[in-house]
Amino acid sequence: MQHAEHQHLPTSFPWRTSTVVVGAIAIVELVALIAIGAAQLAPQRVHAKAAVATPTRHTVANVRHTASLPSHPLRARNRVSVLVLNGNGVQGAASTTATRLHDIGYRIGAAQNAQRHDYAQSMVMYVPGWVKEARRLAHEMGVKLVAPVDGVVPGRLKGSQVVLILGN
């Protein structure tokens, strides 16, 4: 029994060295994860341009051709009917703008108040097939927002293909 009492363990176990090695491995793993995350989150535009510039047999084979919508030339202003809505609350704004549009050749469906008078900015809306004319009107009027007509009953359009809502 005395022999067991005198047996003792090494006094200097390499705890410090083990801790430094494990910490170094953890840092290397962290740096690798950050690099992988940065590569995944980087903008994909550069990769998309490279893929377009060098098509492969697989990318060309997987392309589907869909029928495009029939295109039409830009219609003359006198063929475009515009509904002008006053959405800013300034009295007479719709009629003044309608007169200006009529003077440059547009047909006016109506000039009236919008249901709301708190539009922050002016906008041009269009019915399907009239986007080119809506963009031309927006450009001529200095309006930046152009969108399809949404949520407006066709009877309220007064036969117009394009709607100009005047905002602040």
Image (spheres, grey):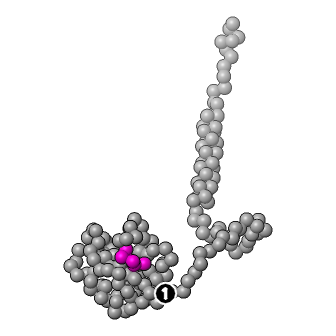
**How many labels, in total?**
1
The N terminus lies in quadrant: top right
Mark 1: few/some/many CA within 10 Å (<14, 14-19, 20+) = few
Amino acid on which disc 1 is placed: Arg
Kindly identify the residue that appears in the image at 61 percent across and 45 percent down. 26
Q: Which image quadrant for residue 39? A: bottom right
In the rendered image, residue 74, in percent from the top left (x then y), is placed at 51, 86
Residue 36 appears in the picture as rendered: yes
- Numbered range of the magenta stretch: 157-161
Tell me if residue 3 comes above or below residue 82 in the rendering: above
Q: Is residue 122 left or right of residue 17?
A: left
**Residue bearing the label numbered 1:** 75
Q: Which image quadrant for residue 149? A: bottom left
Residue 143 appears in the picture as rendered: no
Question: Which residue, as the protein is rendered here, is positioned at the far left?
Answer: 91
Task: Provide the major secondary structure of the magenta segment.
Answer: loop
Give yes or no for residue 108 being in the magenta stretch. no
Tell me if residue 115 comes above or below residue 135 in the rendering: above
The C terminus lies in quadrant: bottom left
In the rendered image, residue 33, in percent from the top left (x then y), is placed at 61, 51
Question: Which residue, as the protein is rendered here, is positioned at the far top?
Answer: 1
Name the secondary structure under disc 1.
loop
In the rendered image, residue 140, in percent from the top left (x then y), is placed at 40, 87
- Name the residue nearer the viewer: 95 or 6: 95
Tell me if residue 121 comes above or below residue 19 in the rendering: below
Kindly identify the residue that appears in the image at 37 percent across and 71 percent down. 155
Q: Is residue 111 left or right of residue 57?
A: left
- Name the residue nearer the viewer: 93 or 1: 93
Kindly identify the residue that appears in the image at 70 percent across and 11 percent down. 3
In the rendered image, residue 124, in percent from the top left (x then y), is placed at 39, 77
Q: Which image quadrant for residue 44? A: bottom right
Kindly identify the residue that appears in the image at 63 percent across and 41 percent down. 22
